[in-house]
Image (cartoon, rainbow, N blue to C red):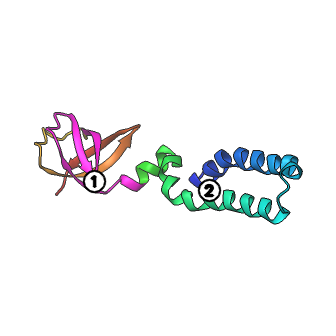
């Protein structure tokens, strides 16, 4: 399921509850109807504006790994074979791919794959 569909599925119950609550209790408030419509539109607009900031949290691991494969990085610690790397300003747990010797801290690496939340990296050539 794409990230936008996951986000929509997570936001839909809140929008339904707000809409139902406005419809149910609006007569008690004494406010004009356009204010209820404006509030509901604001609620939906908030979700639309927040989506670009939240999109990465709703990505599947396949989407996340496809975005990182091929990206350059730098080893933050020695990879023998496990350690940490910095890729796009984020520190990730990493493992050197099979056949790679020990990778020293500060060495340029490239992401070759991902296994759950561990990047599989090799020396940049």
Disc 2 target residue: 47
Q: CA distance from mark 1 to mark 2?
A: 27 Å
Disc 1 target residue: 89
Q: State yes or no: residue 8 in magenta.
A: no
Relative placement, left or right, of 73 versus 30 is: left
- Magenta residues, start to end: 67-95
Q: State yes or no: residue 80 in magenta.
A: yes
Mark 2 element type: helix
Q: Between residues 30 and 7, which one lies in front from this camera angle?
A: 30
Relative placement, left or right, of 55 versus 21 is: left
Q: Vertically, is 76 above or below 108?
A: above
* Position of residue 81 measured from the top left corner of the image (x, y, whole percent): 20, 34
Q: Between residues 51 and 101, which one lies in front from this camera angle?
A: 51
Relative placement, left or right, of 90 versus 34 is: left
* Position of residue 24 measured from the top left corner of the image (x, y, whole percent): 87, 46
Q: Vertically, is 32 above or below 28?
A: below
* Position of residue 84 measured from the top left corner of the image (x, y, whole percent): 23, 40
Mark 1 element type: loop
Residue 37: image tag: none
| Image quarter hosting the C terminus | bottom left
């Amino acid at each position: 399921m794409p990230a936008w569909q996951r986000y929509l599925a997570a936001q839909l119950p809140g929008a339904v509850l707000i809409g139902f609550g406005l419809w149910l209790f609006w007569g008690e408030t004494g406010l004009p109807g356009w204010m209820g419509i404006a509030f509901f539109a604001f609620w939906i607009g908030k979700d639309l504006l927040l989506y670009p900031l939240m999109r990465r949290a709703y990505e599947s691991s396949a989407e996340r790994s496809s975005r990182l494969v091929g990206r350059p990085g730098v080893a933050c610690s020695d990879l023998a074979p496990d350690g940490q790397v910095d890729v796009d300003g984020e520190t990730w747990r990493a493992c050197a791919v099979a056949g790679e010797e020990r990778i020293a801290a500060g060495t340029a690496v490239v992401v070759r794959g991902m296994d759950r939340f561990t990047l599989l990296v090799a020396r940049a050539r």
